[in-house]
Image: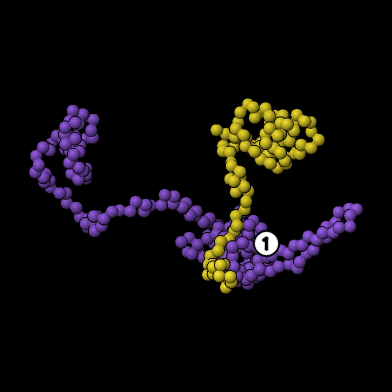
Chain colours: A yellow, B purple
Amino acid sequence: MSFFRITLHRSSIGLPERTRGVLNALGLRRRGRTVFHPVSPQFAGMIFKVKELVRVEEVDKALTKREFKASRTPDPGFYVEKARTRVDMGAGRQT
Amino acid sequence: MSRALFRSSLPELRSFSAARLRPTAAVLPFSWAATTTTRSFNSTAPIVEPVSVNNNAPNPTASQVRPLALKKSHPGAPPAPIADSVKNLLPFLAAQPGHYITVHIHGFPYLVQEGDQIRLPFRMPGVLPGDVLRFNRASVIGSRDYTMKGAPHIDERVFECRATVLGVESEPLRIKIKKKRRQRRKRQAKSKHRYTILRVSELNIKNLEEATE
């Protein structure tokens, strides 16, 4: 099953109520928001209604919110190779 | 091998197969069908068969219970081969003294040399002064005459870069006066950011034997 990956590229400010309603129905509340919807005639029609505002790709898999965040987060680029011995914080003092 | 298996399998299986499966022996695998027809299982005397000559040493732990999870269920991907151009040209870079490296920490580049001090623009959580960090994302390694660029990152087996956490610095307290219009009341918003200080303690370009092992 494939999905539309839809990103709101242009703001809906100043657009008719119908258009903003379509964007809300797609789940695009603000610029830059990306949503995934299954490929079906209903969603294709909605995308056609707002085709000047969104960028659409067809993908194989819908990402969850967490996966989408992870895909955009850069790698930390480091890891703690040798940690100094930690002293219990309850002892009141760190050495 | 199948004979040994069947001999070690349970006697009720034998009687079961003899009693119930005799009519359907045709659908059984060949060896099973052969054993069921050639041997008589109703006698209680043990069947002595010539043991096949086996040159292997006896397993000393044969009687012990084998642990179930010896194999990793998800072994890591095999290491990708290092490109030929890297193999050919890396020794030239490694031979020169004095390297610099662009390490990426949380996606932001820091161009450093060995001995440099970095003031990160944030306080790194979970580290204490004295911890040793190992950098594994770099985009550029260079020396006076050579530069190696990653696309977008350099293979982390090629270099070895470590940094020591020196401590936390803080900026002077910032005071921002917030005031609404047409009102005399002023409010102060204070902020004092903390920054982690690192020192690049080690930067080595590995030679190929180290990198490929």
Report the residue marked by disc 1: B122
Image position of A89 (left or right of A31): left
Residue type, label 1: Phe
Chain letter behind tag 1: B
Q: Position of residue B208 (x, y in %)?
A: 50, 63
Residue in the image at 9% along x and 42% along y:
B44
Residue in the image at 37% along x and 52% along y:
B69
Image position of B208 (left or right of B129): left
Residue in the image at 60% along x and 34% along y:
A3
B31, above or below B109, in the image:
above
Q: Quadrant of residue A60?
A: top right
- Number of callouts: 1
Q: Quadrant of residue B119?
A: bottom right
A21, above or below B169, in the image:
above
Crowding at dot 1, Cα within 10 Å, few <14 / some 14-19 / many 20+, comes out as: some
Task: Residue A17: tell me if it is visible.
Answer: yes
Q: Position of residue B177 (x, y in %)?
A: 83, 60
Quadrant location, the N terminus of chain B? top left
Q: Position of residue B15 (x, y in %)?
A: 16, 36
Q: Residue furthest toward the right?
A: B182
Q: Quadrant of residue B7?
A: top left
Image position of A83 (left or right of B41): right
Residue in the image at 20% along x and 42% along y:
B10
Label 1: element kind: loop
Task: Residue A51: tell me if it is visible.
Answer: no
Q: Position of residue B198 (x, y in %)?
A: 63, 68
